[in-house]
Amino acid sequence: QVQLVESGGGAVQAGGSLRLSCAASGATVDNIHMAWFRQAPGKEREGVAHIRRDGSTVYADSVKGRFTISRDNAANTLILRIDDLKAEDTAMYFCAARRWSQVPYEYWGQGTQVTVSS
């Protein structure tokens, strides 16, 4: 069983930066497919950044150039760096993982809230 615990969210002003972390247990972050999702009030959950087992990454068009997903293998942690925060980035951010790329994400964290004020 993979367990994921997010941290690093908070209230920031537009234009600022945040570093979200997702500590994993039950698997090593470089041996599973992982992603960051977000869900804003009244909106559907959306995937914003994915990192495959091989290290390749995929970003949603809305965050390209501002979001960076990476892995800290020594800490067994998934990272999301967010730069130039915008009000529309306000959402609950979730870390997710799956062992196989052909299946839906099966492991989820509890989320960390990001609130951006303009």
Image: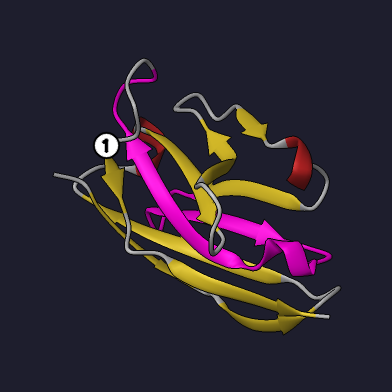
Which residue is found at the position 39% from the left and 20% from the top? 101
For residue 103, above or below residue 80: above
- List the residue tagged with mark 1: 106
Closer to the camera, 111 or 101? 111
Which residue is found at the position 35% from the left and 40% from the top? 97
Q: Which image quadrant: the N terminus? A: top left
In this picture, residue 93 sits left or right of residue 49:
left
Which residue is found at the position 34% from the left and 27% from the top? 104
- Residue 30 in the image, given as x and y percentages of width and height: 41, 37
- Residue 93 in the image, given as x and y percentages of width and height: 50, 60
Closer to the camera, 71 or 47? 47
Q: Amino acid at mark 1?
A: Glu
Q: In this picture, which residue range is highlighted in magenta?
A: 72-101
- Residue 90 inside the magenta-drawn segment: yes
Quarter of the view holding residue 3: bottom left
In this picture, residue 116 sits left or right of residue 70:
right
